[in-house]
Image: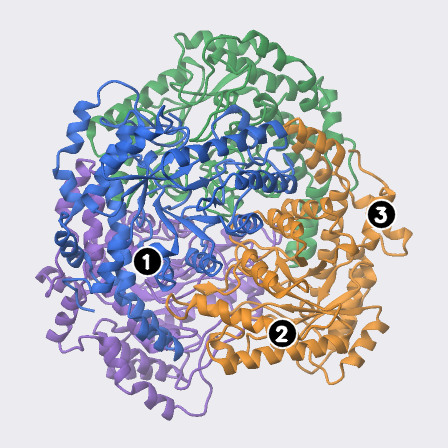
Chain colours: A blue, B orange, C green, D purple
Amino acid sequence: MTTPTTLPADVARDLEEFSIEVPSWGYGNSGTRFKVFGTPGTPRDPFEKIADAAQTHAFTGSAPRVSLHYPWDKVEDFGALREFAEEQGMTLGMINSNTFQDDEYKFGSLTHGDKTVRRRAIDHHLECLDVMRATGSHELKIWLADGTNYAGQDSIRARQDHLAESLAEIYQGLGEGERIVLEYKFFEPAFYHTDVPDWGTSLLHCLALGEQAQVVLDTGHHAPGTNIEFIVAQLLRQNRLGAFDFNSRNYADDDLIVGAADPFQLFRILFEIVQQDAHRPAAGVNFMLDQCHNLESKIQGQIRSVLNVQETLAKTLLVDREALADAQERHDVLEANTILMDAFWTDVRPALAAFREERGLPADPFEAFRASGYEDKVAAERVGGNQMGWGA
Amino acid sequence: MTTPTTLPADVARDLEEFSIEVPSWGYGNSGTRFKVFGTPGTPRDPFEKIADAAQTHAFTGSAPRVSLHYPWDKVEDFGALREFAEEQGMTLGMINSNTFQDDEYKFGSLTHGDKTVRRRAIDHHLECLDVMRATGSHELKIWLADGTNYAGQDSIRARQDHLAESLAEIYQGLGEGERIVLEYKFFEPAFYHTDVPDWGTSLLHCLALGEQAQVVLDTGHHAPGTNIEFIVAQLLRQNRLGAFDFNSRNYADDDLIVGAADPFQLFRILFEIVQQDAHRPAAGVNFMLDQCHNLESKIQGQIRSVLNVQETLAKTLLVDREALADAQERHDVLEANTILMDAFWTDVRPALAAFREERGLPADPFEAFRASGYEDKVAAERVGGNQMGWGA
Amino acid sequence: MTTPTTLPADVARDLEEFSIEVPSWGYGNSGTRFKVFGTPGTPRDPFEKIADAAQTHAFTGSAPRVSLHYPWDKVEDFGALREFAEEQGMTLGMINSNTFQDDEYKFGSLTHGDKTVRRRAIDHHLECLDVMRATGSHELKIWLADGTNYAGQDSIRARQDHLAESLAEIYQGLGEGERIVLEYKFFEPAFYHTDVPDWGTSLLHCLALGEQAQVVLDTGHHAPGTNIEFIVAQLLRQNRLGAFDFNSRNYADDDLIVGAADPFQLFRILFEIVQQDAHRPAAGVNFMLDQCHNLESKIQGQIRSVLNVQETLAKTLLVDREALADAQERHDVLEANTILMDAFWTDVRPALAAFREERGLPADPFEAFRASGYEDKVAAERVGGNQMGWGA
Amino acid sequence: MTTPTTLPADVARDLEEFSIEVPSWGYGNSGTRFKVFGTPGTPRDPFEKIADAAQTHAFTGSAPRVSLHYPWDKVEDFGALREFAEEQGMTLGMINSNTFQDDEYKFGSLTHGDKTVRRRAIDHHLECLDVMRATGSHELKIWLADGTNYAGQDSIRARQDHLAESLAEIYQGLGEGERIVLEYKFFEPAFYHTDVPDWGTSLLHCLALGEQAQVVLDTGHHAPGTNIEFIVAQLLRQNRLGAFDFNSRNYADDDLIVGAADPFQLFRILFEIVQQDAHRPAAGVNFMLDQCHNLESKIQGQIRSVLNVQETLAKTLLVDREALADAQERHDVLEANTILMDAFWTDVRPALAAFREERGLPADPFEAFRASGYEDKVAAERVGGNQMGWGA
């Protein structure tokens, strides 16, 4: 394929309709167990986070929603937060619950052996549903840090049963048009087992709950070597892929910029998605960034991430699917692979620049934002107060 | 726990009822892509394999069934094979299909894009059902080497759909009291994707088929770091663990002697099993060895494997479950772990020796077999002919 | 092997001479990037840490040294700290430097591209040498969190050169009888590369420095599947194993109780050590715990860890090495493996209990400590102040 | 970077000088332990393999050497084979020894406990040196399948000592201008340990031998997650990277087409190489394909592999290294990463097509070969005889 200067009309339409949700916590500080490095200009409250998120959207045109984390993003008046977001051209997206930072949850939350603790965790999720409604969202994301550190510490089986019961009660709280998505995660540092380690476990709980429960796949939450695009295809085949968390990892749950570690993996994943038309809004998959920024500039990191997804999606949309199907049918392994790789190696950046300029956006959002002076401005303005990070 | 000299009565009863199926192919030659090393005395036909398998049972008293692999174990008269087995005190167990060694299956079998190839693969499985009936078995094990080597080579999604259709047709062939078990496998050398890579995929197909379809878990078929005992607990919770393949691995699908690489993992897995009473015959889980022997003596390797399972099962049955539940409830992490480890470190070998002697079995089956002269005898007798191995 | 009631004299002597160094930070709070759970009674200063460490020794008789972390364990008068330790029957062990928690080190320390930062990091290490002398220690342990998060972020090669220069300057500061040990680590969360990722890199730097530089192997710092006992054997063959950090991991650098995740791995590692007599003090390997405790009781966790090492070491010393060598020579794979496993499965706890009682120690140090009332006492006494953790 | 239509002169020069050695065994059949699929036209003797290898060179202009495997490629008259190669425009490259397919080597070769077996293995290598001279080569590649399957099977330490002695004797056989390269490999299926598992071990043996011994790095021979470009940088820093084996893997030692599984990894590796000018002939690194083809067309697979390396190398040569160094110095993490990625995403295929046409080569060697009719021709001609594969 020669380098295209413009995108085909159908590709342009798909890209126009495709949007990415950004995480409020991606604009706060984060780090490792050793050290969280602060940066001048880091938001000190949820309003400032949303203001920063709005920059990502302003420059890319593709990130119009921001996920909230509760209670990290707790404010007195969620209506006011929603209005503020709308003034910035943003809507509020998924609500993320948090049952991993209170002393009560030291040994689990929705899976805890003690009914009182489960009650507390269930109530927290019901409260999240209230926040969801107050913010105009209709989705609650459940990620649990539940698990054990040592064999024998607790009963794997009993915890599954507790989880099923807890989820059922939360599910009862859903109204029409609302849904929960349940995230799985292969491991946490120091863990022996996690209570929702894989897509199979998440899906089984969703199947038991009903149609308003779906799986959320986070690219960073798998065993080494896992073929993630296979899982995407399988969940789509079951109509149960509710949300997709973009990020990138080399070793652990690294939450690096999506596409940074393995851009070809991102391409293969997105290709499974477009093959089942799941990139279209009608499919109901919420595509999100779930990543944070330790060393790099946060807003720049978010913009780069949106661009990485957008460029890669464009590549997958350019795959000659007819020729591919034909080569597959003939079992011409190398021709089929060549057709796929041809799209991967095609440089879509010039055509995307044109696409943006036609829509009044900067040709290169990353450079444009860097040149905008926003970072200096907020660094100068945001003096005093406590910078937000995980847990604050 | 002090070293017990006898087993508690309930433990003894459980061990007495517990049995392990052995694989006919474990008595033939095997190797790597580089080299298959032959050994004097290796069986040259299925009858000799069964004779060797019968040794494993004669010395351990716990391995009364032998799995067949079709067509590796094809004989003219399966009734005669069955009678021969019964004369040796054995019954014939699961029938294992084979769709990975014919040129037609180069690009897949039950998942193949071409209807003719799928037809052939389905027919092979229906033929296996006939063999199953002829041998007095009621279980068909399906393990597929289907998959692709390169991204783009074929459609992941289409292959799932083909697989579902093919399995449905095989399932239609089942009579009452018969079942199929579907094995999953994380990877094959040179593969990009396998069509049944994980327990979730296998379970989804089984759920779609019906109650007579269950999952088979092979300990060697997971990503590095996978918590296998969690999967065991989950499949038992769904009543879908049909069979369990014992073996051991360090890196790949190594098919080493069970317990060789990580004896504590075997203990944790068996503890999940006994906690749900799944070691009892009533649970309907077929426990099998699925391993082969490259460097070590084959019959000795099988006997050692049976002993490893038996010893470890005894340890799990000795766990003080009441004390454990109590420590778990108090979240006394270290006490709970200590209670579990106490059973692991208990030396059950003297009590098992007594258990065997009471039943007319040698105290140490491994040494007794080595001293029996059987290996020399068959090495002398089995001269000429072709030694059996994979594919022969 | 029947369960021994007493240890052979040579094994008892070896165990008597063998000692384990404990980490001061193992007695403080630790956790994950999400949450550090505090516990009543947690030390509020280095003196209290040493008091707790002394408990580990008092009950096990095998943990007479405590490693310090600088500046976590900074006190005004290190001489006073040393005296305090000696009053408790302890000596101060390795000094651990820290260049991973200051803003200056955000992009590296000894490997940093900027000379000023490297200067600061080198000076910190020279200061550590002063602390080392003030505490009566003669060993400095260097573990670096240096590395990058993204490809292209910095020059891998240049950083190696910087590291070599920085280490050379620190090495110049060593006096006779002093040494540095350089730790390697496969990954850090969010990293793309670490500057000392493997034993080969650590060893190359040590070889370039001279005889007073040695490698420290931490069991938790390897890629999945790495055969750690091979590395032990190789480093001993080069006379460059300076220190050995015990801990346990399932997935990441989990710092769990040694032997918790894979007790057979610990056995294999220690067997390589005893085969080269490296467990003896004369070999100069400093055996240490490097682990921390998130959920479990800290002192109990340390005591359990010491016991796990001691029991496993006893097992390796009981291996019938003559019989093993003979089976190996005959390539009797299964007999050789059986001889090794016989020692692994032997229950050494009764004999160790006797060994302890003969020496005026409790037969079961873990239970004895739990019954001692020490934890309640310090929880009652240590009210107010700031509990110590990583970074404090 | 806009898509270049021609390559800068210095890049073109570097590409012109850069060459890749192809493996004779890549033109024969290969497979897994289950099945080797044959293909019409597969070579039946070493001459036919070389004829096929010459096709790779004829169409790409970059693969003028072919490695031999001994005794797989044993012929009566190596002088005749050499002449035949030269007539085809090829030279004969590295000689690969083989000590993994004879019954004598079941338990090891150069590491074997039995002197007689070691003698045989050493003599085989000395014979390889003769073959090397007869073919005009000056390099011997040693890859060993030595190791054990079970803990305790043999002494890890003793095997290292044997290996050192055996290598020393082979090394004595080297003349001036000749060298040996020693390959390492993380694992073999069914292994518990390999005797040369990592670059550190290989390098230590080379350092002990002398300047004419160097390490060969095979991209498929590492633990999951290993940062291979780091190892490249480290070995180049030690002047000990003798050869580099290209291939690709998802899980095991898959020997897939280089760049197929992770094209960005290939880019990062080659970027470390060009940063140290090691792609230039003067650096003395022998770049080779070490891969085989199970499902795909063999010659096409080799051509695609050469193109993948060539395209990726061109990308790394286009990195704006001055701008990168500047961004690195300013610790502008995202700008540095962006500069690197800019080169990765640049489509070099049009410029490479022009580069080839200027040199009388087809613009698209892959398509040109497919259209050439060669495969049909040899399929028609090569009837009868035994197709060559591993071991034949």
Query: What amino acid does circle 3 point to?
Result: Ala
Q: Which residue is mark 2?
A: B170
Q: Which residue is mark 1?
A: A267
**Mark 3 residue element:** helix
Q: Residue furthest left?
A: D9
Q: CA distance from mark 3 to mark 2?
A: 40 Å
Q: Position of residue C233 (x, y in %)?
A: 51, 44
Front-most of residues A48 and B195: A48
Front-most of residues B111 and C32: B111
Q: Which residue is mark 3?
A: B12
Q: Is residue C381 left or right of residue A281?
A: right
Answer with the quarter of the image where residue B120 lies.
Answer: bottom right
**Mark 2 residue element:** helix
Query: What amino acid does circle 2 point to?
Result: Ile
Q: Position of residue B229 (x, y in %)?
A: 62, 47
Q: Is residue C215 left or right of residue B219?
A: left
